Amino acid sequence: MIVVLSLYRPRVEDFLAARGEDILAVIPESMRTPRESTNPGYPIRTIDQWDNYNALTRLAVEFEGLEVTNVTTIDEPCIRAAAFLRDLLGLPGQDHNSAVGCTDKSVMKRRLEAAGIPVAEHRIVHSQQQIRAFLDEMDGDDVVVKPRHGFGTINTHRVSQDNFDQLAADGAFAGPSNLPDYFDSTSVAGDILALGYVAERYIDVAAEYYCELFLDEGSLVHCLAGRYSNPILSDHLAGSVWLRPNSPEAVEVCELTLAAASALGLTHGFGHCEIFRDRSGRWLVGEFASRPGGLEVPRMLQLSYGIDNLALLADQLAGRRPSTELAPQANGAIAFRPVPAPAGIITNIPHEAQLLALPGVIEAEIFLRTGDSTGDLLGAMTHAAYIFCVGDTAEEAEKFADSALSFCQITVDTGS
């Protein structure tokens, strides 16, 4: 039996169940009713908090009698819980010590620094006064404040001398509100100041990169580098493009990623590393996660290299060596752009056929339609569509993607 931990989307468990695997899912209590309403065909257990180690220990006792062979997840809030269960059950995969290093941003940066890997100057802060004190020490530089155990840029702020007072007055450091119920199972919904923010010196980023890594018992399956169209902190709607594997940028990004994985003790499964190059030419590791990249990075892997993350994971869980054949599937470089949806009721949105007729566009995924309301959507869910383009070079692919994004105009009725 394979135990799958998931925050709210049943991607892994549904994929494995469709392959005939014996599955048990562990999900937040708030997701029990909607999940059971779909008649998933596999048993479900629930948990109130992913960091409730007493509850996890009780689950481990139950799993001891179920011949569990693997515990897996691809969701950031579940990574420590999955590793803790593996340790208790003596199962293969990332252990808890490594999982802490890949999810606690303070521990992560300390371990990277100790290994000689460059990161931004940082510290843990537990109050607005400590945030202000760190800001005052930065000699005029801004700072970035983010939850110690956060994810998805939720409640992440660039703080300056000019905006500190306004952010504090607006409650920016008190934690986000109006999150879906399943976030109650994560530390993002808790008292973040008590848990600790990580404050770090703001980096004047010239370019932000990412790397997708997959390891199998210490052996490299793939390590592939891409570049975001804009730094994520300044543009959470940024798309991305794959780099030529032998380009100087890709080589630097992959070397830093592999060094970070080693420093954090990751030998098994996915890695996603974000790396900065500042305007002075320095390279720094921003963060490392033991999961696949988000948004459309997995789809980009499929279009560019024929890599299916879930199939790779399924092979690994079944004890089969994941494939290392990475023949490019597209004749050129692939870039994607998300299409944001303004708040309101959509009155007009292009059709797939219109986008596919544009130069360079090879795929268009449209999720919202005329009449859909966008005002209550969260984060990446405000993306109405994703556009994928191919070009002879990364620069040409991005040019096509930007042009298609300009074409994809969405109008809404704001009700005002």
Image (cartoon, rainbow, N blue to C red):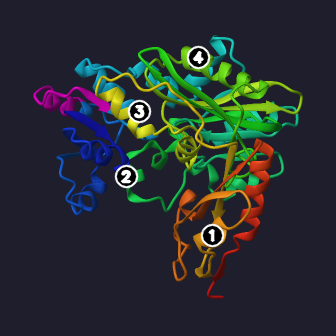
* Alpha carbons under labels 4 and 3: distance apart: 28 Å
Q: Residue at x 67, y 41 (%)?
A: 145
Q: Earlier in the sequence, mark 1 or mark 2?
A: 2
Give the residue pinned by disc 4.
111
Instruction: Give SS at disc 1.
Output: loop
Specify start and end residues of the magenta stretch as a single range: 57-71
Side (left or right) of 376 relative to 10: right
Identify residue type, mark 3.
Leu
- Residue sticking out furthest to the front: 331
Q: Is residue 65 magenta?
A: yes
* Alpha carbons under labels 3 and 2: distance apart: 21 Å
Q: Looking at the image, is mark 3 or mark 2 nearer the viewer?
A: 3
* Alpha carbons under labels 3 and 1: distance apart: 33 Å
Q: Residue at x 53, y 41 (%)?
A: 150
Q: In this view of the protein, which residue sits in the foreground, 401 or 5?
A: 401
Q: Earlier in the sequence, mark 4 or mark 1?
A: 4
The answer to whether residue 146 is above or below residue 175 is above
Identify residue type, mark 4.
Arg
**Residue 341: assigned label:** 1
Q: Looking at the image, is mark 4 or mark 3 nearer the viewer?
A: 3
Q: Are marks 4 and 1 in contact (CB under 8 Å)?
A: no
**Which corner quadrant of the image does residue 250 belong to?**
top right
Q: Residue at x 64, y 81 (%)?
A: 412
Q: In this view of the protein, which residue sits in the foreground, 359 or 83?
A: 359
